[in-house]
Image (tube, helix red, strand yellow):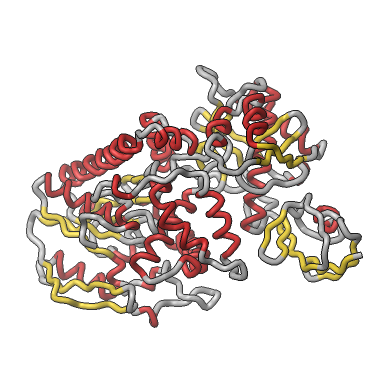
Amino acid sequence: MLNIVANGKKFLVEEGATLEKIATMLDGTHPYLLAKIGHDILEMHRKVTRDCEIEFLDLTSTHGYRVYQRTAVFVMIKAAREVLGKKTRVVVEHSINKNYYCEIMEGDFVLTEDILRKIKEKMDEIVKADMEIVKENFLLEDGIRIAKEMHLHDKMQLLAYRTASSVNFYRLGWFYDYFYGPMATRAGILTNFDLKLQDGGFMLIFPSQNDPLQLSELKSVAKLTQVFKESNNWARILKIDTVGALNDKICQGMQGEVIRVNEALHEKSVVKMADDIHQMGRNVVLVAGPSSSGKTTFAQRLCVQLRVNGLKPYAISLDDYYVDRDKTPLDKFGKPDFESLYSIDIAKFNEDLQALLAGGTVQLPKYNFLTGKREYKGHFLSLSAESVLVIEGIHGLNPELSRKIPDSAKYKIFISALTQLNMDDHNRIPAADTRKIRRIVRDSQFRGFDARRTLEMWPSVVRGESENIFPFQDEADIIFNSALIYELCVLKPYVMPQLFAIEKSAPEYLEAARLLKFLDCFMVIVEKEVPNNSLLREFIGGGCFKT
């Protein structure tokens, strides 16, 4: 018998008992989906062979919520194939408010309410039967054969670049699929979900992480949806919608073409915005977005195109108005909250903005991220009739920052890295992961923070974005997607040494290990192929813009 402490309670259990069996001894509000032992996250089919302390996780935890989403996708795809045929291609396109937008790719197929209802009913049958989800390990060549038998051509393409000799598949009845990340052991854990038609596809709706008895809210996000559609069109232009397809292009020596076309698509969008600003006669451009979305370089590229229109743009970064680091407000956990509006010296910014627009001359500050202090080095600015202020920062669309400026003078841009690339048809790449990797690279290169420190701060970043940034994205005149299809291939050699340096005893180790496994799927592109005006240069250095 083993001495086990599970969620703070002591038990004697038989050696070799599964985590799933041990979890039945606990009274949980929601089904347990994962277990944490030490610094390891384990699926519930794993057996316990030694005395240990276990923390069981449900869908109110970040790791547990991902398992719930992944399991719902697995059940949904099986249900769709049983309704529409075993060769049916279902693609998980992107996430909106944590719900997934999906499409059925079958030529001229038109999804109807009746078909979607049948898929939902089939999902309900699978859940009610509490079908077992089995994890099976295969030699790589056998895994590729199974992917072919299951008509998972995207998986075949991805697995062709796998360096390990084996691969894990999950089985649900007759259906095998490959998923990036752990899965639940039974379909019956799906206590709450729904399907709803939207924009030619459908939304797979999950429970709220904070209140699992309620479904996540479906918000009207017309501008964001349009950006996702544009990004999907870009992926089709490049003929790259999955990591396997990207790796194919690199192996064929076509990375240069991929980079040039992707960068040209970015530039085309920037040109259109500059033309709109000129035609509308706006003289204050506000650029906002979450951390590591590329705001600074975007603002510089926009300034170039504004000059083409005969205007005199001046870029101002809100980062330069940070309060000294020792005066940064604290979050509810007592840690510096760099995402708070009040980490910015609002009074000083408004004072300078009003002075400039009134025709005065202002000495602009420069924030030193190494010392954590604002400095003045004789950079004076005054405006003329042709001048346009391009103000960028995470809080750029917050009304508090420009409340005395009439809306008729403003052009508001929201920028974020909305990843258009998926691992494969069923495993999407969260936009937050792309930004997180960007930030690790940038912080280590230019801000004096190692990867552990960046990952430690990340939960605060996410909370701050949810409270202070994303609520204002609907205020934007336009949304710009700063993601680059090829960027993770370039960032990989920069970030992997940083992640490997995090010790297993550190709380951030689990996330570092997850990111390392994720990055292992990408081939490398050397940074010399990245143009010097690319948004990616903001993170790796070597850019042509002085920031």
Q: Say left or right for 131 vs 359.
A: right
Task: Name the residue at 51% across, 37% down.
Answer: 93
Between 489 and 419, the one lying in front of the other is 489
**Where does the C terminus fall, quadrant-wise?**
bottom left
In the displayed structure, does residue 263 sit left or right of residue 379?
right
Identify the residue shown where x is 17% and y is 46%: 305
Residue at image location 62% in from the left, 31% down from the top: 144
Left or right, 32 with respect to 4, comes to: left
Residue 66, position as x, y percentages in the image = 62, 50
Instruction: Please identify the quadrant where the N terminus is shown.
Output: bottom right
Q: Is residue 233 visible?
A: no
Can residue 395 be seen at all in this image of the molecule?
yes
Furthest toward the bottom, the residue is 326
Rendered view: 297 above or below 178? below
Q: How many marks?
A: 0
Residue 284 image position (x, y, % from top left): 21, 56
Q: Is residue 518 above or below residue 504?
A: above
Q: Relative to the observer, which residue lies in front, 114 or 14?
A: 14
Left or right placement of residue 109 versus residue 363 in this view: right
Q: Nearer the viewer, residue 319 or 287?
A: 319
Q: At which x and y percent is residue 490? A: 38, 49
- Residue 515 in picture, x, y percent from top left: 53, 54
Q: Residue furthest top?
A: 108
**Image quadrant assignment for residue 468:** bottom left
